[in-house]
Image (cartoon, rainbow, N blue to C red):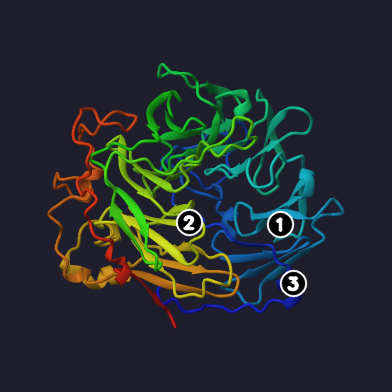
Amino acid sequence: METLEPIRTINVNPDFASRVSFIRWSPRIVTESPPSSSSTSSLPQKSSYFDCAATTKRRSGIDKTEEEGGSSIRILLADEDTVRVWDVSDAKWTATVQGTGGGLGKIVNIEFGRNADEVLVFSEFGVKLTVWSLVSGRSVEIRDPKFTSKGFGYRSCTSHFALLTRPAAHDIVTIHAHTTYRLVNSFSVPTTDAQGLKWSPCGRWIAIWDSASSGYKVLVYTADGHLYRVYTGGQDGNSGGLGVKSLEWSPQGDYLAVGGYDRRITLLSNFTFSPVVFLDHTSTIKLPRVPVWQEQVSISGQRGYITAAQPMCPPIVTYLPTDPNPKVGISTIAFNNPDGALIATRSDSMPTTVWIWSLKLLSPFAIIVQHSPVRSISWHPTIPDLLMIQCNNDQGVIYLWSSAWERPRIIVTPLDRSLGKHDAKWIRLDTPRSEVPPPYSDYPDTGNAEARQEARPVMMSGDYGSYFVGYVEEEGFESRQPPQKSPNGTTGKEPADYFFKNPRNAGNLDGTPSSSGSSKSPGGTTEDVDDTFQYRGRIFVQS
């Protein structure tokens, strides 16, 4: 991967390729487990399978025999009726599953299961979920899945599979054993219209949220199906909110982040599931100590960022009360890797704005206002403070933010932007966090330029007709000196201070300043357009 050279070319039947609707990679299996005084070499018995160490990170189960498919890297292609799987390393291995619908409709979604040896096939109309084993060729059918792209998941430590079903007029969660998918447990959920479920990273909890028509309602169950907590909001002295729109666990499982239709994120403690932090996305931004970057597009199409003067009001989408699907509420919650110290969020009512929050400061860390609505945000898998933003209507343009940079970067990809919708993804390199050198882990250190060169972030971008894989590289960072001025104000702090544990008077929990002061941004509006026009953040295409 470090050379960006192709490791295998797969020839696909042109007729099948023209019908392909799904492309999936097999899951990346993390098999490290912390030291333990008890043996973990065999599967736990039925009476104890719900016990799970909070620090366990194994994805495919405790038994090493389960992980045979975990070391394989496979790619899956599927149309409406046929699934084909190839192994990246083994050119002789291939698998084909035909007639997966069984006369009950076409394929509407397909995913790998707990590892590369299983495939989940969701049929049309929510009739059934079929789990295919690529080892034995056998399948297991699970009836009445409520959703086809959400409402299911694997427990991290034992790989038990939880599925939200609706066989009649009520919601039921079923839990299945790994490999055999035998029904282990099921329980009814007191919801009107449950919208999804998510296992906690530790495997102890299952979080379920109800539709907004039922009010603000989050239910937390233990792994064996006992209702532990129902959170309905309102513990801050205000109303319970307008309902839940999104929900995410932090990577370490410390918090359960609940995004509401009221433009508020509530962080619940993983002990009592009571609120500990509220993150409000206000329509007027007045945070003098927080940089607000606003994208500017010239008539000629050149792009750059300026520091917006405060107070400022990002573009807001209006809606009618009678609208059945109003553009409002927190639709995106993305914790950074691996510790979740930063959160990137987006509210549908402010579609062009990305909020970056620090859980150490309990306040906004940076705010980025784009020219076009934000389509996706994604953190780098191993570089904690590197964020990618993609926007609608900005084909072939990628936006990057890092706490080590003076301002966000804009990259225009070297592709024809008339061929179709572009997409970009990070490519994961197995570099541990402790080995990520500057400038991505801190400010530059001129003594290890070669190591920094090898740790450059890698991304893939393209459309249906073409793509490229390239490095993101800073221009001249080998000789750049640490800045004397913090991008988060005038305190002179460096990026490490933003994640420091010492308390600091950064404002109220809702992100508003704790004391009155100048509302003018430190940079005002006199700052020049970002010199990313000259590609400070550049893409080098491997030829």
**How far, Cα to Cα, is label 3 from label 2?**
31 Å
| Pointer 1 with pointer 2, Cβ within 8 A | no
439 and 212: which is toward the camera: 212
> Who's the residue at 31% across and 66% down the image?
532
In which quadrant is the N terminus drawn? bottom left
| Pointer 3 with pointer 2, Cβ within 8 A | no
Q: In the image, residue 254 lies at what x, y percent? A: 40, 35
Q: In the image, residue 520 lies at what x, y percent? A: 22, 41
Residue 169: quadrant of the picture: top right
Q: Secondary structure at mark 1?
A: strand
> Who's the residue at 55% across and 39% down the image?
327
Q: Secondary structure at mark 2?
A: strand
Q: Which residue lies most toward the front here?
A: 299
Amino acid type of the residue tagged 1 in the rendering = Ser
Q: N-terminal of the two: label 1 or label 2?
A: 1
Residue that badge 3 annotates: 16
> Who's the residue at 56% across and 43% down the image?
158
Residue that badge 1 annotates: 133
**How far, Cα to Cα, is label 3 from label 1?**
22 Å
Residue that badge 2 annotates: 391
Depth check, mark 1 against mark 2: the one in front is 2
Residue 200 seen from this side: no
Q: N-terminal of the two: label 3 or label 1?
A: 3
Residue 217: quadrant of the picture: top right
Depth check, mark 3 against mark 1: the one in front is 3
Q: Which residue lies most toward the bottom here?
A: 543
> Who's the residue at 66% across and 79% down the image?
11
